[in-house]
Amino acid sequence: MRVSLKDVAERAGVSIKTVSNVVNNYQHVTPAMRARVQEAIDELGYRPNLTARHLRKGRTGIIALALPELGNPYFAELAGAVIDAAAEHDVTVLLDHTRGEREQELLVSQGFRARVIDGLILSPLELEADDLRGRDDDVPLVLLGEREYDLPFDHIAIDNVAAARTAVRHLLGRGRTQIAYLGERTDSANQPAHLRLAGWRAELTAAGLPAPESLVGATGGWDRGDGAEAMARMLDSGVRPDAVFAYNDLVAIGAMRVLHERGLRVPWDVAVVGFDDIAEGRFGAVTLTTISPDKQAIARLAVQSLLRRLEHPEERAGRELTAEYRLLERESTLGRR
C-alpha cells in the first residue's frame, strides 16, 4: 500500500503542510522538526511522487542527453556522470546517440522529443552556428564540447589549447624533442582536434622547436584502430618521434600497440600522452599518462545550467562555463617505478 503525506503527518504528529515542506526541502523548517518528520518518513518508507511534483510545475522530469559516440568510453563515463548529477535533482535522463552525424544532430536539436523532455544537453560535432541559430524549439538547450557558436545557449567546455600545451610541456620536461601529434582531421570541422593541434604547435614553438607536418598524423576517426594506423604510417614514412601526444586515449592506446609491435619501448624509446582519462588507460600493461577533464564538473554544470534555464526562461544570453582538467602522470611517460 502506498504511503501518503497524510500517513507521515499522523505518524510525526504534525500537519501535512509541514511534511510537504520537509519533503520539498524548504529552508524555514527547524532542524528538530525536520528530524522528526524524517524519522516518520524512514519508518513508513515514504517515497515522494516525483511525477506529480514535476507535473505541478508543468514539466515531465525528463531531460535528454545527446552524445556522438556511446561506444567511446569517455562519452559513456560522461553519460554516467550526467545521470548521477540529474538524479540529485530528481530528474531522469533520456540518452540519444547522434553518431556525430549532422542530420541526427539537427533532428535532436530541433526538438523531435520536445513533448517528452524538459531540456536537452547536446554534444555536437558537425552542427554549424546557422543550424542552431534558426532553432525554433523553445526547449532549453545546453551545449557541451569545444565548438564555439556565439549563440544564446549555455556552453560547457575545457580549455583544449591550454590542456594540449600542458601535455606537450610535460613531454618536453621529460627531455623529448621530437613530439608527434596523432589525431588531425582534414575532412572535418571538428574543433577539439584543431584546438589540440594548435596547443601542440604553440608549445613546441614556445620551446624554440619546429613543428613540422611530418610529425602530424591524420586519422579517419578517434578509435584504437585509427591511432594504430596513424602511428604505423608515420613510422613507415621514416619519421621516428621520441614522444606522441594523441587526440584521445583510444588513439594513444592504438599507437602504443604499434610501437610495441615495432620493438619500440614505451616510454624509453617513445613516451605517450593521451587525453580523456578513460578507465582502459589505467589498467593496460603500460598505464597511460593523460589529460583528465573533470567529467563530474562538466556533468554538474550541464545539469545545473539546464535547470537554471527552466527556472529563468526570460534569460536570453548564453554563458561560457569552463571545467577544470589535470595531467595524470603514469608509466607511459615516467616508466615503472
Image (tube, helix red, strand yellow):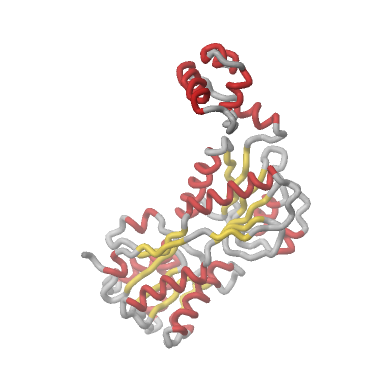
- Up the image or down, 168 lies above or below 206; here it is above
Residue name at image x 45 percent, y 66 percent: 226
* Nearer to the camera, 36 or 45: 36
* Nearer to the camera, 133 or 319: 319
- Up the image or down, 141 lies above or below 171; here it is above
* Nearer to the camera, 309 or 136: 309
- Up the image or down, 1 lies above or below 261; here it is above
Residue name at image x 63 percent, y 21 percent: 17
* Nearer to the camera, 257 or 299: 299
Single out the residue that lies furthest toward the left.
Answer: 337
Q: Residue 257 in the image: state x and y as whole percent.
A: 33, 66
- Up the image or down, 105 lies above or below 238; here it is above
Q: Is residue 229 visible?
A: yes
On screen, residue 269 versus residue 317, left or right, reads left
Q: Name the image quarter holding residue 330.
A: bottom left
On screen, residue 47 versus residue 243, left or right, reads right
Q: Residue 228 in the image: state x and y as whole percent.
A: 40, 68
On screen, residue 321 versus residue 138, left or right, reads left
Q: Residue 112 in the image: state x and y as whole percent.
A: 71, 45
The mark total stands at 0
Q: Residue 160 in the image: state x and y as whole percent.
A: 51, 67
Quadrant location, the C terminus: bottom left
